[in-house]
Amino acid sequence: MLLDRNGPASDPWTHSDGAAIGNIPLALVPWEALPEALANRAPGQQIGVVVPGSLAIAEIEALLPELALIAVGFPAYSDGRGFSLARRLRRAGFAGRLRASGPLIVDQFAYALFCGFDEIALPASSAGRQPAEQWQRALSHVGARYQRGYGDGGNILDQRRAKRLVQAAG
Amino acid sequence: MYRYDEFDERFVRERVAQFSDQVARRLDGSLTEDEFKPLRLKNGVYLQLHAYMLRIAIPYGTLSSRQLRQLALIGERFDRGYGHFTTRTNLQFNWPKLRDVPEILGLLADVEMHCIQTSGNCIRNVTADHFAGIARDEIEDPRPTAELIRQWSSQHPEFSYLPRKFKIAVTGAEQDRAVIKAHDIGLRIRRHPDTHETCYEVSVGGGLGRTPMIGKVVRDYLPKADLLAYLEAIMRVYNLEGRRDNKYKARVKILVHETGLADFTRRVEAEFAELDGPSINADPQEVARIAAYFAPPAYRALPEKSAALETARAGNPDFARWVEVNTTAHKQPGYAAVTISLKPIGEAPGDATSEQMRLVADLADEFSLSEIRVTHAQNLVLPHVKLSDLFSIWRRLGEAGLASANIGLITDIIACPGLDYCALATARSIPIAQAIARRFAEDARQKQIGELNIKISGCINACGHHHVGHIGILGLEKRGIESYQITLGGDATQDAAIGEILGPGLAAEEVPDAIERIVEVYLEHRRAGESFIENVRRLGLAPFKAAFLELDRAA
């Protein structure tokens, strides 16, 4: 199941086991096959890559402009490396789609969005137990947060500052 | 004291609703037990030996009388009429029912409290010097820093699924009363020698547990304004690079150790250099807003000495002794901080009944500007007491069994709950503490021995801080029998040190004799004015070891 902040979404990407991407318009390849897939790329064809959460940013940084999607693997919900990798990918200027791929739980949905992910790809075993409406409801439990720089607006420190400015003006 | 604003209030109410939803999803099978476990842990709910245990956060050990009364009420209504103060200055209830937890969280939110992140692989309740704001050796009050970190670390989107738990402590004084060197991050407020601005000395990689280590300094002088960005840099390096293959090697201390301090520091500094500080750090107005809550209260102008106190002391030796041992000089002339011992002889260290909590709350209202502190040594503090009120307080404490004059002495023992409660424990802790306290109960003897910290853990996880006890006791299980390992020479202060093992493990009933032998060596060899730990440092382990091994042969 694929989910974004608006609910379930259909996945336009086609997984390719290796670099043989033929004429698949949106081809999602494993990290090991990425250099070859990029070399094989036809005009107009878009490439996405599946990377492990342990990937060092330096290894992928130079390739970011070539990529339309990065799927960061979460081997388990308890392995939070992907959240930090997402932050570093966004800081390095990656502007394509960022996907968290693995057995996440609904309580991590808001965190993933705040860290720069656009969508979650869940294995069937998790998706079966955690229907899409639970993911939406979990978002409603998470309002403003204390940390600045995570996601758009809505952080408590900036809201306090805005309030102070209004009070000072009033 | 800090008070919640509308944002803090909403944040905590959202957590109550969120946890209720999580419990419902566990009950309907949406979440597996494995998936639910970290969620309940992050809300302070443990599954213990006999029941669920709820751990309530007491940020940097500061409580109002209203909050303490609410804890007393919760203890009566949902537990068995008592609670246990921990070495992280939290309060644990040992017998609540899971179905009652959302209601308890609601009652806590009513008094601006919560259980957020008192467990789990996340940033835990931040601790600070229990004499913050009142200690005479203080450079700057650590509480505004601790409150800023409390907020910043709550539900952090990036750092809530760390390799392992993460503990931060702050001190702003010369003497370290917050054990900062045994924390994943320890912050010490100090003045820069050239600019005279207050800065943070940042230590990383301290910790007790299976592999005890003393924290190492990664930054000598961090400008205060850069705090949150620098913490973010440390946490990101740890989150990405900390080991996840073995839970016993997952703390940041192992990363620092295996990477090497120089290389680890370089990685943190490289990450910090990439960050845009002004977009991450709290702005100066926010820092000032928090700091304003910790401004000194309205003290009365009083003389340095109180004639009433001196008269009462002269007429009552027990009271005089209590004043000498349990009170601490205050910044403000005419005031003192009172430490209330939760270590009466023969009781479980750190336990307080609901009645005792109410009495302390009443005393705080009458005599201490409604404020209470919890110490990592599992005692309570009335921070702002007029010297002339000490006698009344002592009498009222005595009626409730809370006037033990033993702070910092051999019977002021730190002990984890151990095998009487804890699912992780390998041996009992509380009965060992009780037996030692009974052995040394006599006041004259305690006075003769002077300052001596005994710390007891019922398993290798070291919640009882045994590694940094002057005498440490670690309870293990060997072939189905409890066995106690004794260490010597640990130190929890600015001279932090890990104790060394004296010899083979002992049976529970042998422990008081062993402690007695160690103390005898000290009393025999000490120079005038030399404390136990100074004596151990001067003599080294050898004479203590010899006495200890004699005991082994005698047994």
Image (tube, coloured by chain):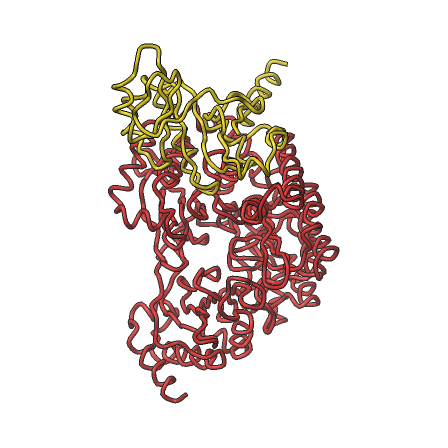
Front residue of B41/A65: it is: A65
Does residue B198 appear left or right of residue B322 in this picture?
left
Q: Give how far across and how far down residue A16 sits, in percent.
A: 36, 26
Q: Color of chain A here?
A: yellow
Q: Determine whether B441 is above or below A82 in the image.
A: below
Rendered position, B320 above or below B142: below
State which chain is coloured red: B
**In the picture shown, does residue B112 fall above or below A71?**
below
Classify B191 as above or below B464: above
Determine the residue located farthest toward the right in the rendered image. B77
Question: Which quadrant of the figure contains the C terminus of chain B?
Answer: bottom left
Q: Residue furthest top?
A: A43
Q: Residue B361, how many percent across, how many down?
A: 68, 53
**Location of the N terminus of chain B (image quadrant):** top right
Q: Residue at x 31, y 17 (%)?
A: A66
Instruction: Look at 51% across and 57% down and name the residue there.
Output: B87
* Coordinates of residue B33 in the picture (x, y in percent): 57, 49
Q: Quadrant of residue B102?
A: top right
The one nearer the camera, B310 or B133, is: B133
